[in-house]
Amino acid sequence: GSLAANINANPTGNGNILSYATTGSPLAGSCTRVAIWLRGTSSRTLSVQLQSAGGAGTGFNYCNIGNAQLANDIASATVITPTSASYTLTAIDTTGNWKVAVCQVTGLAGGPMDTFRIRVGNGGTYNLSVDAIEFLDNSNNHCTP
């Protein structure tokens, strides 16, 4: 919590908040999932873009996180299967508690993930803190990429 990144924005366009790329090398290694801890509110989903193929735009995969995708702990989280569309009007309200979303990072369109981005959507109101982004294996155990 004390080292969390706070997103406090009312964007007028879609945009990256946090981005990490390996320019062509698979980012997740043998890991199959990523857990993202959140606290706060937003009027739209938070979109996690899992991009493949060297960041060249050939494989866009989105984990869209709204209230229905959040859990109190990793063990009870439903794994989100990425889709090709980003951002919905589903709000987030963690009622002041830390909640977690778990995204699948294998079997992506375009090949292995090499770019990870947390994105906000146009017209949303965000006041979210993001903390403890963790890679996991299929059993939700910590995994080092």
Image (cartoon, rainbow, N blue to C red):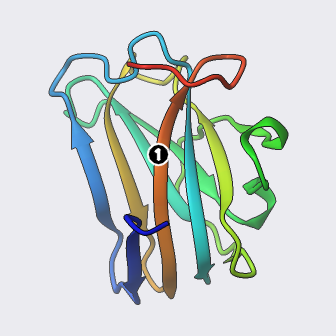
- The residue that appears at 50% across and 38% down in the rendered structure is 134
Q: Does 100 sit above or below residue 33?
A: below
Instruction: Tell me what residue is drawn at x 48 percent, y 72 percent.
Output: 129
Q: Residue at x 34, y 86 (%)?
A: 12
Q: Residue 120: x percent and y percent? A: 42, 69
Residue 2's place in the image compared with 132, above or below, is: below
Badge count? 1
Furthest toward the right, the residue is 76
In this view of the protein, can residue 77 be seen by the observer? yes
Residue 19, horizontal then vertical, whole percent: 26, 50
* Amino acid at circle 1: Ile
Judge from the rendering whether residue 108 lies leftward or rightward of residue 98; answer left or right.
left
Which of 99 and 120 lies nearest the eye of the viewer? 99
In the rendered image, which quarter contains the C terminus? top left
Across and down, in percent, residue 117 comes to: 35, 49
Query: Residue most toward the left?
Result: 23
**Residue depicted at x 63% and y 58%:** 65
Looking at the image, residue 94 sits to the left or right of residue 54; the answer is: right
Tell me residue 57's x, y (percent). 26, 37
Q: Is residue 45 visible?
A: no
Residue furthest front in the image: 2
What residue did someone put label 1 on?
133
Relative side of 62 to 137, left or right: left
Mark 1: give few (<14), some (14-19) or many (20+) Cα within 10 Å: some
Q: Element at badge 1?
A: strand
